[in-house]
């Protein structure tokens, strides 16, 4: 490896974004210090190297490749090519979800998702969610199952979607795979690098009964990799606000965010 390969590779990736100052703000690195990385006068600490790698979706070790190899690396080449020359089935909207497997890797696994519903008064719906890697992207699959307390009708919804980490927010776009009549968007705010147990945000969807649009605060509780879904599935469903089956921390966050 040549002494300036890292600086060359970093400058190459920076050229694909709007400005170095914006990159520094998003990563959380001092602009003056970052300039030393670009000039080759200094190397990032392991912690800053991880931040830079997560931002660009490139492993730290790959920054140390000779520049000739680095610029043809699949993750780098796709950034250099830009959406204007991407293949028809990979351009436009789809580009938001590609190259996300590294920055989102720490979020993969199972969750219980809690949100307020307008289908039933004073109720919380709990759904099961799984994030995994699939075909070079991060996939979201979720399921809701609620029983109407008035007539016992069962409402079942399954969703298949994609996930992107953009501007330090997690965006989830899902398609209602059974009814095929709705798209749902969820925006989550990761609070601190060490805080993963609860993700909070907002979800925009369609009610189970009337099929009308609604918006609700949402909380995802993280469970990671699990050997059996049985325990999680027992909690899936519609619950009264005062139910002991609802995660108390999640309920507190939901009610605190309710307008």
Image: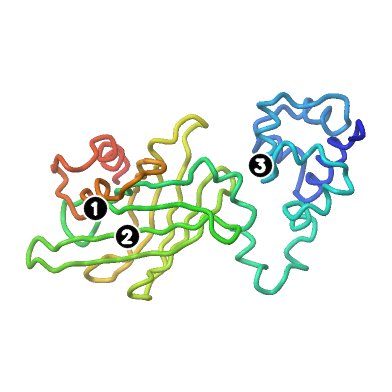
Q: Tell me whether circle 3 and circle 1 mark residues in contact (CB < 8 Å).
A: no
Q: Position of residue 176 (x, y in %)?
A: 38, 69
| Circle 2: element type | strand
The residue singled out by tag 3 in the image is 55
Which callout, 1 or 2, points at the residue further toward the start of the chain?
A: 2
Q: Tell me whether circle 1 and circle 2 mark residues in contact (CB < 8 Å).
A: yes
Q: Is residue 255 left or right of residue 37?
A: left
Disc nearest the viewer among 2 and 3:
2
The residue singled out by tag 1 in the image is 236
The Cα–Cα distance between marks 3 and 1, rounded to whole angstroms, is 34 Å
Q: Position of residue 163 (x, y in %)?
A: 51, 55
Tell me which corner region of the image, top left, top right, bottom left or bottom right, holds residue 105.
top right
Q: Nearer the viewer, residue 3 or 122?
A: 3
Which callout, 3 or 1, points at the residue further toward the start of the chain?
A: 3
Instruction: Say above or below: 252 vs 41.
Output: below
Label 3 Cα neighbours within 10 Å, binned few <14 / some 14-19 / many ≥20: some
| Circle 3: element type | helix
Q: Residue at point 24% right, 61% down?
A: 145
Q: Residue at point 36% right, 58% down?
A: 142
Q: Residue at point 65% right, 31% down?
A: 28
Q: Which mark is residue 143?
A: 2
Q: Position of residue 235 (x, y in %)?
A: 22, 48
Q: Is residue 28 left or right of residue 207?
A: right
Instruction: Say above or below: 243 vs 44.
Output: below
Q: Nearer the viewer, residue 230 or 256?
A: 230
Tell me which corner region of the image, top left, top right, bottom left or bottom right, holds residue 88.
bottom right
Which callout, 2 or 3, points at the residue further toward the start of the chain?
A: 3
The Cα–Cα distance between marks 1 and 2, rounded to whole angstroms, is 8 Å
């Amino acid at each position: 490896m040549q002494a300036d390969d890292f600086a060359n590779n970093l400058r190459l990736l920076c050229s694909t974004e709007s400005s170095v100052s914006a990159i520094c703000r998003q990563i959380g690195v001092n602009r003056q210090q970052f300039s030393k990385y670009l000039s080759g006068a200094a190397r990032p600490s392991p912690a800053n190297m991880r931040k830079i790698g997560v931002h660009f979706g490139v492993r730290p070790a790959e920054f140390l490749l000779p520049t000739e190899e680095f610029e043809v690396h699949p993750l780098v080449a796709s950034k250099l090519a830009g959406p204007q020359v991407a293949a028809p089935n990979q351009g436009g909207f789809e580009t938001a979800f590609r190259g996300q497997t590294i920055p989102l890797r720490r979020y993969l696994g199972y969750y219980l998702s809690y949100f307020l519903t307008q289908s039933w008064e004073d109720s919380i719906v709990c759904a099961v969610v799984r994030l995994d890697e699939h075909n070079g992207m991060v996939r979201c699959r979720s399921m809701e199952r609620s029983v109407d307390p008035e007539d016992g009708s069962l409402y079942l919804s399954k969703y298949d979607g994609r996930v992107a980490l953009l501007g330090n927010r997690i965006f989830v776009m899902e398609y209602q795979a059974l009814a095929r009549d709705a798209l749902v968007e969820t925006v989550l705010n990761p609070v601190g690098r060490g805080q993963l147990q609860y993700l909070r945000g907002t979800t925009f969807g369609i009610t189970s009964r009337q099929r009308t649009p609604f918006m609700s605060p949402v909380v995802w509780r993280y469970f990671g990799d699990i050997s059996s879904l049985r325990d999680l599935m027992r909690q899936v469903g519609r619950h009264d606000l005062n139910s002991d089956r609802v995660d108390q921390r999640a309920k507190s966050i939901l009610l605190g965010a309710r307008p």
